Image (cartoon, helix red, strand yellow):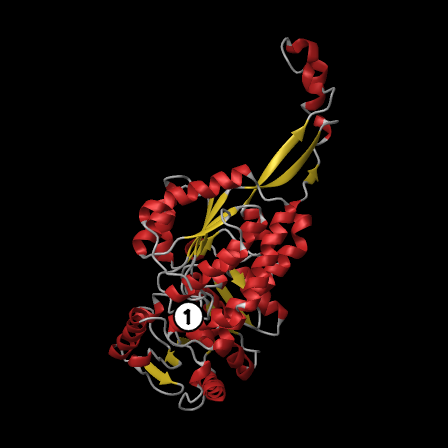
Amino acid sequence: MENFIDTPPSELAPTLQRLRSNWQASKPDYAQRMDDLGRLRHALRLRMDEMAEAVGKDFSHRAKAETRIADGMTVLNDIDHLRKHLRKWMRPTRVGVGWRFLPARAQVRPMPLGVVGVIAPWNYPVNLALIPLATALAAGNHVYLKPSEHTPHTARFLRSLLAEAIAPGRVAVATGGADIGAAFAGLPFDHLVFTGSTAVGRKVMAAAAAHLTPLTLELGGKSPALIAEDYPIEHAAARIATGKWFNCGQTCIAPDYVLVPKGKRDALTKALRDEVIARYGENLTNLDDYTRIINAGQYNRLKGYLDDAKSRGIERVTLAGHADPAQRLLPPTLLLDPSDDALIMQEEIFGPLLPIKSYRSLDEAIAYINAHDRPLALYPFSHNRATVEKILHGTLAGGVSVNDTLFHFAIGNLPFGGVGPSGMGAYHGRAGFDAMSKQLPVFWQARRSGGDLLKPPYSKAKWLIDLIVR
């Protein structure tokens, strides 16, 4: 791979200007957009092993299958969806004008905005860079990408991949630390997509406000799984285990805590232990499939949650293995009925620690969810349709998977986005295409129009005014 030097701050604005000038000179048509998406897909597919190796280096170890699924399959799936529907999405949509304005006609045209900025996080460093990038390209924009400074090997891979797949002048990559990220967020983009923490999202929004840059903010929060009385505990445990310990819990929509009927907590604890042992071995002997914590700072933060819980006398259940700070290895761990003042219940966990909270009634569980910030995801578990509808009606989240976890993210036809502290706006599929386009209203006046009569002296048009004002 080429020599890799972080982007000097002085290059950010000129690079954006070049991207915008190139876009203005030659706005991508359907053929260009399809070609860019096809070339990106082909290049990524051929370099999948290289991608997994780069991501693995950044994590020190990440399960290769998880990288292929979460950072490979998801991107290929979204590109396929974009290419399949792009021609239809680009067509102007005719809209009615109403009888008062006949015989005029009107339409809505999706128009590209210009240059879209993308700030990607470290937890899924390819997925959360390339899906918004591909969506912006599909909408006819150029793209300036800022990968996370915590995944430098992946950033190198992305720069190389995009240089191979997309002709120069349509996509650029900026790299560097928090200072570059802050300066990048303050550039006058035509749209900016940020994925990351709520705290950083507030800073990005403040930086973008100087230019009134439209934003898509994909943030996080504490996403609950709610197991109803009727749902089999073992089945819930299997699906919650997948959502929680995939990528070692470093997922913005991972179940952050579980609400379980009082009296079933111990059964859930046993079922989760059985799941972990079956997947990773009683002593975490299957470490190849267990991802490490990304860096020492994140490891120490998570360790701090455990230390705080211990100081408060909260029962801790390690499901398999033991911690190894040298490897940044933190085992799957449950915290049973932690109090709300515990640190682990105040902040998004983003790791393999899972609080289990008992509830006495469904109303109590719903009230608990509503007493906190609206989550990015919600996972109701029930085979009773009325119960599920009660949960959906009584709460509001960014997205929902019923009787499973994570999967709503991967469905191209579903918009993905948060609400309130968990984000604003949405992308994926048509939602992303629309968000990164200007829905341009166009009114076509007829050769002859009643509007020509609506001028002083209005007494001459009184009959027409009386007709339309009724």
Looking at the image, which is closer to me, 390 or 397?
Answer: 397
Q: Give the position of the C terminus as an image quadrant.
A: top right
Q: Is residue 20 left or right of residue 316?
A: right
Residue 29, quarter of picture: top right
Please count the marks in the image: 1
The residue carrying pointer 1 sits among few (fewer than 14), some (14 to 19) or many (20 or more) residues within 10 Å by Cα, namely many
Q: Does the rendering let one see residue 142?
A: yes
Quadrant placement of the N terminus: bottom left
Q: Is residue 23 above or below residue 230?
A: above
Q: Quadrant of residue 199?
A: bottom left
Image spot of residue 313 (x, y percent): 28, 80
The amino acid type, in three-letter code, at marker 1 is Gln
442 over 132 or under it: above or below: above
Residue under pointer 1 = 250
Residue 263 in sight: no
347 sits to left or right of 383: left
Q: Pinpoint residue 16: horizontal percent, then vertical percent.
A: 42, 44
- Residue furthest to the bottom: 282
Which residue does the image show at 31% across and 73% down from the upper left?
299
